Image: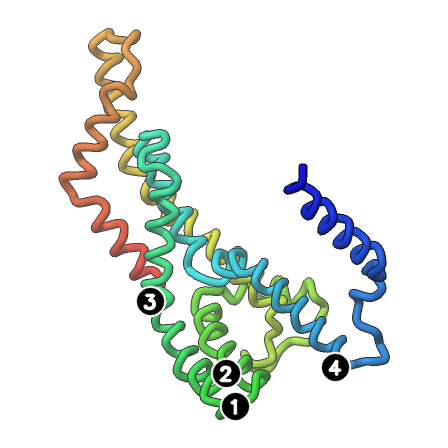
């Protein structure tokens, strides 16, 4: 009991001090408009957190990731292997291929904008403009003029005279739907040989009177065997990477 008395007294003292301290209100946490420097710092922090939260979406939508992951998904569906390879493997492969394809763009951004900015040779706004240059060049190379014209028309803005006049709000969605179209075209080409093989196996089984045997039981191992024999992963990876040339 004697040992507990000092602890009880300490607790009472801390409770009294906490009660005596003025409670923190929401108004006290929000910077006052009378102090523009504090308000600007708070806004910069808010914008920085917003950009970090949008980083995964930017990685997916402004790079080659969309086309690659869709092609790999089409390939798995054409093979008919269900969940093999697993989603984690396909996403990981798509990410590494994205880093490989986008590495020239990243190097240009690093040389033109990031290194000079970190060295104090230019301001943030100038570095941001220089960093946007290589990214916009990549987006323009992969975007169809038809899709770009669609969003410029929908935005009801004046027809741009040069590429520099094209706003990002029109370039980004045009790039995305162009990537979707290209990915579906490649996916269709991937499906053709596997569909032909399925038709051949089904016709053979029907001619032999083996209607109760599911054709997938025969066609699946044949498709896997042929895919391995032609070194399918090598061919698919090469075709996907060269499609961004």
Quarter that holds the N terminus = top right
> What residue do we see at 33% from left, 56% from top?
96
Mark nearer the viewer, 3 or 2: 2
In the figure, residue 203 lies in which quadrant? top left
Mark 3 or 2, nearer chain start: 2
- Residue on which the image places disc 4: 37
- Residue on which the image places disc 3: 245
- Residue on which the image places disc 1: 122
Mark 3 or 4, nearer chain start: 4
Q: Secondary structure at mark 1?
A: loop
Mark 3 or 1, nearer chain start: 1
Residue in front for this viewpoint, 5 or 239: 5
Mark 4 or 1, nearer chain start: 4
> What residue do we see at 46% from left, 56% from top?
179
Q: Where 140 sits versus 179, above or below? A: below
- Residue on which the image places disc 2: 130
């Amino acid at each position: 009991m004697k040992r507990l008395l000092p602890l009880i007294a300490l607790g009472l003292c801390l409770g009294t001090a906490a009660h005596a301290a003025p409670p923190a209100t929401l108004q006290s946490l929000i910077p006052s408009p009378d102090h523009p420097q504090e308000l600007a710092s708070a806004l910069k922090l808010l914008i920085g957190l917003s950009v970090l939260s949008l980083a995964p979406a930017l990685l997916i939508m402004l790079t080659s990731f969309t086309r690659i992951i869709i092609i790999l998904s089409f390939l798995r569906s054409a093979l008919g292997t269900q969940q093999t390879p697993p989603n984690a493997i396909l996403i990981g492969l798509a990410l590494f291929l994205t880093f490989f394809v986008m590495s020239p763009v990243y190097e240009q951004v690093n040389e033109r904008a990031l290194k000079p900015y970190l060295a104090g040779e230019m301001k943030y706004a100038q570095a941001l403009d220089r960093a946007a240059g290589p990214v916009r060049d990549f987006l323009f190379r992969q975007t169809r003029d038809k899709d770009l014209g669609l969003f410029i028309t929908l935005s009801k803005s004046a027809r741009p005279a040069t590429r520099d006049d094209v706003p990002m709000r029109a370039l980004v969605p045009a790039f995305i739907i162009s990537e979707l179209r290209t990915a579906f075209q490649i996916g269709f080409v991937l499906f053709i040989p596997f569909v032909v093989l399925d038709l051949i196996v089904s016709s053979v089984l029907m001619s032999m009177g083996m209607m109760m045997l599911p054709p997938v039981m025969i066609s699946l191992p044949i498709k896997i065997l042929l895919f391995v024999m032609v070194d399918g992963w090598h061919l698919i990876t090469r075709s996907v990477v060269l499609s961004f040339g």
